[in-house]
Amino acid sequence: MDPLAELDQLQTEALSAISHAQSADQLEQERVRWLGRKSRIIEMMKLIPTLPPESRGPFGQRANQFKKAVEQSLAEQKSGLAQTPTKSHLDVTLPGQSFHSGTLHPITQTLGTILSLFTSMGFEVADGPEMEFEYYNFDGLNIPKDHPSRESFDTFFVDYASPNPKQGRMILRSHTSPVQVRVLEKHEPPLRIVVPGRVYRRDALDPGHSFMFHQVEGLMVDKKTRFSDLKGILDYFLRQLFGPETKTRFRPHYFPFTEPSAEIDIASHLKGKSSFAQKEWLEIMGCGMVHPNVLQAAGYDPKEYQGFAFGMGVERITMLRHGIQDIRSFFESDVRFLEQF
Ligand code: PHE
C-alpha cells in the first residue's frame, strides 16, 4: 500500500477510536496505541531511509501532520470528558433544586370555607350572570325606577338593552342579590342556596375599595322560616368562621328587598389584627326577611312562603381573618403576597 494512503487510513481510524474513549484511562490507551513506541506510525517512520529520496520529504511532512492531528484529538476528547459530570462529581453539599408549587388564592380559600359551612347546613351552591339586567339587580328586588337606593349602588352600564322592556338595560351587577330573583323564578321553595360571585361598583381604588369584589349571597325560603332561623344560622356561621368566642350583634338597618333588615356586627379577639379592627364592632354582613314584594314579583304568596336572605363581602372577611390591610393586594398578583396564605 502506498505509505501516504496508509497514513490517511490510519488517521481516520485513530480519530474515530479517540472520539469513543470514555475515560482518562481509555484515552491513555489510545495515545499509546496510535503514538507509542510500538505504534504503526513509529514503525513507518523507521522505514523512511528505505524510501526513494524524492518521497522521503512528503512522507515525513505527512507523518508529522498525522501526529499533530492525533494529539489535538486526544486533547479535545480530554477536555470534553472533564466537562461531562459523572457519578464521582455528585456534590451532596450543594443546595437542592427548589421547586415552586402554587397555592389557592386567599379569596378562593375564604370562599371555600364559607361555602362548605353552608353546604354542611343543607344549602346548595347557585350562580348567576355578572352582566345582568336592571330588572334583576333592582326592580325584582323591590327597588323601583326612581328609588334613591339605585343611586347608592354606583352602577356600571353596558351598552345594551334587553328587547324585553321589563328587563331593561344591561349592567354589571352591583351585588349578588339578583340571583335571589333568578332562583325564585326557576325553583319552587323550599330552597336554601348560597351564591358566590363577583360584583362591580364604580368605586375609586383605595385600601378599602375596589371596583370589583366578591360577595356570597344566601337565601332560604320555606313555609315557616322565621327571623330566629336567620339569627341562629348566621350566628353559628360567624362563630365557625371567626372562632367560638366571637360575639355577634344584629343592628337594625334598611335594605329595600328585606323587611325587617339588619346589619350584623362582630366584636372581637380579632381587634388590632387589621385596620378595620380599630373599632369595637365591625360590620360584617347584611341580612333580613325576604320582602313580601320580592316573593310576589317572583310569583309566590307571601302568606304561604317566608324566607330570609343575607349578603357578605368576601374580601373584607379575608382581610379580617388574616389581618390584611389593603384590598388592592388581592388583585396585584404579587407572589410574595399570595404565597403567605
Ligand atoms: N345586597 C346587599 C348589599 O350588597 C346585601 C344584602 C343581601 C342585604 C341580602 C340583605 C339581604 O349590600
Image (tube, rainbow, N blue to C red):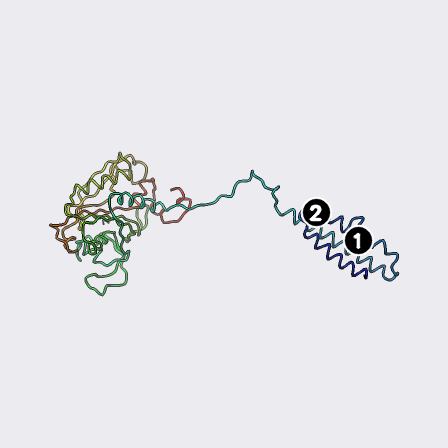
Residue furthest to the left in view is: 303
Viewed as shown, does residue 12 lie left or right of 134? right
Q: The disc labelled 2 sits on which kind of residue?
A: Gln
Instruction: Point out which mark residue 26 bears.
Output: 2
Image quadrant holding the N terminus, namely bottom right
| Residue situated furthest bottom in the rendering | 163
The quarter of the picture where the C terminus appears is top left
How many marks the image carries: the answer is 2
Tag on residue 219?
none
> Mark 1 belongs to which amino acid?
Arg
> Cα distance, mark 2 to mark 1?
19 Å
Of 152 and 119, the residue lying toward us: 119
For disc 2, does the CB lie below 8 Å from ligand 1?
A: no
Q: Is residue 32 left or right of residue 146?
A: right
Q: Quadrant of residue 271?
A: top left
- Label 1 lies in ligand 1 vicinity (Cβ under 8 Å): no
Q: Is residue 13 left or right of residue 55?
A: left
Residue 82: x and y in percent read 65, 46
Viewer-nearest residue: 273 or 185: 185
Residue drawn at point x = 79 percent, y = 58 percent: 62
10 Å crowding of disc 2: few (<14), some (14-19), many (20+):
few
Q: What percent of the width, then of the height, locates residue 236? A: 24, 39
Q: Quadrant of residue 232?
A: top left
Q: Are marks 2 and 1 in contact (CB under 8 Å)?
A: no
Against 63, is 224 above or below?
A: above
Residue 130 or residue 43, whichever sits in front: 43
**Secondary structure of the residue carrying numbered label 1:** helix
* Earlier residue among tags 2 and 1: 2
Position of 81 compared to 31: left or right? left
Residue 40's spot in the image, x, y percent?
Answer: 79, 53
Residue for point 22% across, 38% down: 248
Residue named by callout 1: 40
